[in-house]
Image: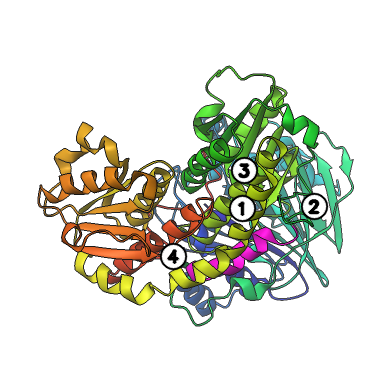
Amino acid sequence: MCGIVGYIGKREASPILLEGLKRLEYRGYDSAGVAVLKDDALTIKKHKGRVTDLAKNASAHGLSGMLGISHTRWATHGAVTEANAHPHVSHDGKIALVHNGVIENYLSIKKFLEGEGHTFASETDSEVFSNLIAYHYAKEPVDSPSRFLDSVRRTLSHIEGTYGIAVICTERPDELVGARKGSPLIVGIGADEYLLASDVSAIISRTSNVVYLNDGEIVSLKDGELNLLTSDEEIRTPEIQQIDWDIAESELGDYEHYMLKEIFDQPQALENAMRGRFSDDGSTAKFGGLNVSAQELRQVDRILLCACGTAWHACLVGEYLIERFARIPVEVEYASEFRYRNAPLDKNTLVLVISQSGETIDTLAALRESKRKGYKTLAINNSVGSTIARESDGGIYQHAGPEIGVASTKAFTSQLHILSMLALYLGRLRDMSYQDGINYVAALKQAPELVTETVKLNDEILEISKKYKDMSDCLFLGRQDMFPIALEGALKLKEISYIHAEGYPAAEMKHGPIALISAECPAIVLATQPDIHGKLLSNIQEVKARGAPVIAIANQSNPLPPELVDDQILIPDCHRAVLPVLASIPMQLLSYHIAKLRGCDVDKPRNLAKSVTVE
C-alpha cells in the first residue's frame, strides 16, 4: 500500500526521493508528496495523482536540501485530496512526517490537541501523529541533544494502531528518525548516506545493505551514525543484511507491462524455486530452512494453511496436493479471519502461512496468533528479511525475484510449485513409494520447459481476447484442484479489467450460478482432468444449452469436441503435481490482454495495492 522513502546524506535529496517513489508505484497509491529540509527551511510539494506529475512540480520549484522524506498515499482516512496527501506538517511548522498504517485512537488524540490549541488542515489520522510529536517536542528540554528523538519516542507510547513513519524536524536539520509497528520499514546503508523505505525496491539502486526494523524499534540517522533503540530506550545493535536480488530484475526491459514480463519470467521463477531442493537420489524434495525435523513432521496429524487473496488460492491448491500425495488432512483459512476465530486445533497441527511480500498484515497477525497458541508455524514467502520470514519458526523462500505488477503471476505459480514440492516431501516421509517419488521429481523438473511451451500460446490467446473484451460478466468453472485455479482466473480478470467474474466448482453451477448464464456471460472451463472428463462435458453441455459462449482450457492429448466449445486453449500434458501451474497461465494471459484491450492500467489497477499492510 502506501510507500515511504526518506534520505539523509551528502547528495541532493529530492531526485533520490522521487526515484524511490517511482519504484514504489506498484504498491498502489492515489497521491504523492515530498518534503525537503535545508538549514531550517522546509519545502513541501504534494500532488493528487501520479509521481510523474509530482516530479514535474517538484523540479519546477527547485527543491534543494540533503535531508528529506516522501510518500505515496493509498487513502484510508479522508478523501483523495492534496490536503490529505503526505507529508503532514505540525501546526507550528516544525515537524514533518510520512506515515503508513492506521492510528486507531486518533480522534481522542485530535480532541486533546485541539484543546491545546493545535489546528489541523486535513482529514487524516497521520496529521495527528505530526502534531503529537510537536506537542512533546515543545515540552522536551531545549538544550537536550536527543530532544527530537525523545519527542518521537514519547509520542509512540500514546499511539494505538499500526505505523511505519519517517520524521524530520526544522530545528534538527541533521537528523532523520524512523519507527515501525505493524508496518514495514527498512534502513538502507549507502556511501555517506542513509535511506528509510517501506520496501527494498525503493532503495536497491543505491545500496544492497539494509537493516530491517522490528516492531517497537526506533532509528535515528544523523552525523553518519545509525542508532537503533526501542520505545523504552533499550539500545539495539543493528543487524545488516544483504538484499538478495539485483536491480535489473525489477526493470521492465522490452516488455510493455510488468505483468506480461512476469508471466514470461515464470520458467525462471520455477527453476529458482527448485534449485538445490531435491535429494541426491532424485526421489524427494528437501528444504533447508524448515527448522522442523522429519520425525516431528511424521507426527503431524493436520495442516492449517493461512493466507489472503491470490496466496489463499495457492493454499486451496495446496490442500488438494498435500491430501492427494501426502495423505494428511488440510484445512485452509483466510488469514484475516483466523485470529478472530477460536478454532479448535489439535496439538499435532502444523500451521503454514503464505505471503509473497512477507508483510501482509492479516497473514502476519495469523502467524502471531498461531505462535501465541504454541503451534509450530512455518511460512512461504518471496522476501528475505521480511517480517513474516523473521517471525516464523521456519519456512521456504520462493526466490522468484521482485514482482512489480499488482496482479500476481510468477509469485502465485512459484507458491504452487513449492506447495507441490512440499506435498512430495511429506508424502515421502509417509507412504509414497521411491518410484513414485522419482516420477514426481522428474515431473517437477520438467515444469519450466512446459511453462515455456505454454506461454508461446500468447498470440493465440490475444486473438481470443479480442472476441471477449467487451463482456461484462464471466464465469470460471473447474473441478477438484482446478476449482482454486478457476477462482484465481476470476480474480485476475476482475482486478485488472474490472469485469465482473466469479469462479465456481463446475458441478455447483446448477445450484445457483446457472441463473447468470446467457449469451453475454461466457464461461471459461478448465477441462484438464481425464478422470472426470465426462462430468465436465456434461457441465459444458448445460452452459451451451443456454446460449453462452464456452472457452475451454484442455490438454493437448484430450481436446474437447469442437461443437461443444467456441474457443479452446490446449496446454501440454503433464503430471497432476504440475497441472495447476500450467492451467493458470492461459488465464493470466487472457486477463492481461483483455485488460490492455479495454485500456486499463494493467500494472496499477484502481483501488488495489500490491502489499496490503493495513487492516
Q: CA–CA distance between discs 3 and 4?
A: 22 Å
Q: Nearer the viewer, residue 425 or 172?
A: 425
Q: Nearer the viewer, residue 231 or 537?
A: 537
Residue at image mark 2: 220
Between marks 2 and 4 in the image, the one whose residue lies nearer the viewer? 4
- The numbered mark, 3 or 1, whose residue comes first in the sequence reads 3
Give x and y (percent) for residue 491.
37, 50
Between marks 3 and 4 in the image, the one whose residue lies nearer the viewer? 4
Q: What span is in magenta?
A: 261-276
Amino acid identity at mark 1: Tyr
Whether 563 is among the magenta residues is: no
Whether 272 is among the magenta residues is: yes
Q: How many marks?
A: 4
Residue at image mark 1: 440
Give x and y (percent) for residue 313.
47, 44
**Tag 1's secondary structure?**
helix
Give x and y (percent) for residue 241.
81, 58
Between marks 2 and 1 in the image, the one whose residue lies nearer the viewer? 1
Are the two marked residues, 2 and 4, in contact with CB atoms closer than 8 angstroms?
no
Between marks 3 and 2 in the image, the one whose residue lies nearer the viewer? 3
Q: Residue furthest bottom?
A: 254
Residue at image mark 4: 572
Say left or right for 443 vs 387: left
**Tag 3's secondary structure?**
helix
Q: Residue at x 15, y 39 (%)?
A: 515
